[in-house]
Amino acid sequence: MKAVRYWLGVGWVMACFASPSHAGPYNETPESRDFVREMSERYGFEAERVSTILADAQRRDSILEAISRPAEKTLEWYEYRRIFMREERVEQGVSFIRKHQEAFERAEREYGVPASIVAAIIGVETWYGTYKGKYRVLDALATLAFDYPPRSRFFRSELAQYLLMTREQGFDPMALTGSYAGAMGYGQFISSSYRHYALDFDGDDVADILTNPVDAIGSVANYFHAHRWQNGGPVAEQVSDSLPKNSPLLTGELKPTLTVNDYRQVGIIPKTDVPGDAKARAIRLLGEEGSELWLTYHNFYVITRYNHSHLYAMAVHQLAGALEERMRPLANENNGESNSS
């Protein structure tokens, strides 16, 4: 989560199993010694233990290659959409919802997030737990923390959060696997998100989103609730495109700053009943049949808190819509059985 994705929503790349190039143990650089000292002084870790963990970390050049070319920045919408809007992904999503129906229903009751959105996140991220990534999280975070200057500060923080998380949950820090950016489990949480939002949703005293789908369902719902998902609120809708190419109403920021009324004044009329003062943002995407204009709302922005890409958010939105449409007849059948009994 929040980590860039290259294929199937997780950190798999074609070079995933390339042999590492090794510039020396990660516990022998000035930066890593500072890291060991901080973990000892600030968080009470044994310095020797942290040094041993870092010495076991392997530099992976394939990680550095993958993070430089995320799909969200290299593909057009119609290409990106093809990856996620596939019949088998919808079918497996329906099966995943039905298999864990009780957990989805409880998550929706407690956090106000629809089962379709939670399932779509897990479907985009890991194909419902099928592909969670094959890199050791330790290797990914150490490589990016000490050998990727553009974001080394961020990933050193995530490495610290990872050691804290594994200590809190009783996990072996040298054993966990995930994406090339260190995201883990069904919902691909990075370490800081794991510590803040992962839940023990089944009552076994461990917040395990790595292997436990029930905990993952509750945790994704909790993440959206914490980022102010509006239950029942609109997400996005395609509208007629009458905006000039360089219109100031096509803003670059992910967070919507204009209102529905701003768009109505230039002839962009929502089909749904949305208050005029509701925040909105128009985005133009290249679809299979040409340009598409979409009006996106607060809940669309909330999806981008999970991954900072409007392509990602649109894929989640459309997959969720497909799951809802496919589940509707099943829900009607169940309601009919309840009414007739």
Image (tube, helix red, strand yellow):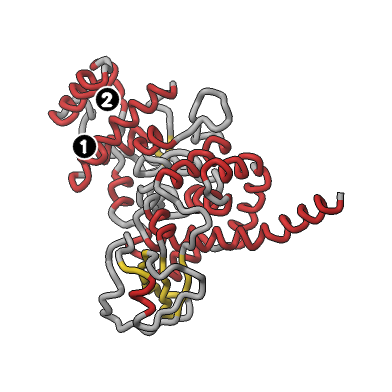
Q: Residue at x 55, y 41 (%)?
A: 110
Q: Rounded to the nearest whole Å, what is the CA distance between mark 2 and mark 1? A: 13 Å
The local crowd at label 2, few if under 14, some if 14 to 19, many if 20 or more residues have their Cα within 10 Å, is: some
**Horizontal and vertical percent position of residue 207:** 49, 29
Which image quarter: residue 17?
A: top left
Which image quarter: residue 72?
A: bottom left
The local crowd at label 1, few if under 14, some if 14 to 19, many if 20 or more residues have their Cα within 10 Å, is: some
- In the image, what residue type sits under mark 1? Phe
Kindly state the secondary structure of the residue where label 2 is placed. helix
**Horizontal and vertical percent position of residue 67:** 31, 51
Q: Relative to 48, is 179 on the left or the right?
A: right
Kindly state the secondary structure of the residue where label 1 is placed. helix
Which image quarter: residue 313?
A: bottom left
**Residue on which the image places disc 1:** 146
**Residue on which the image places disc 2:** 55
Q: Relative to 43, is 166 on the left or the right?
A: right
Q: Which label's residue is closer to the chain start, 2 or 1?
A: 2
Q: Residue at x 68, y 60 (%)?
A: 328
Residue farthest to the left, as pictured: 30
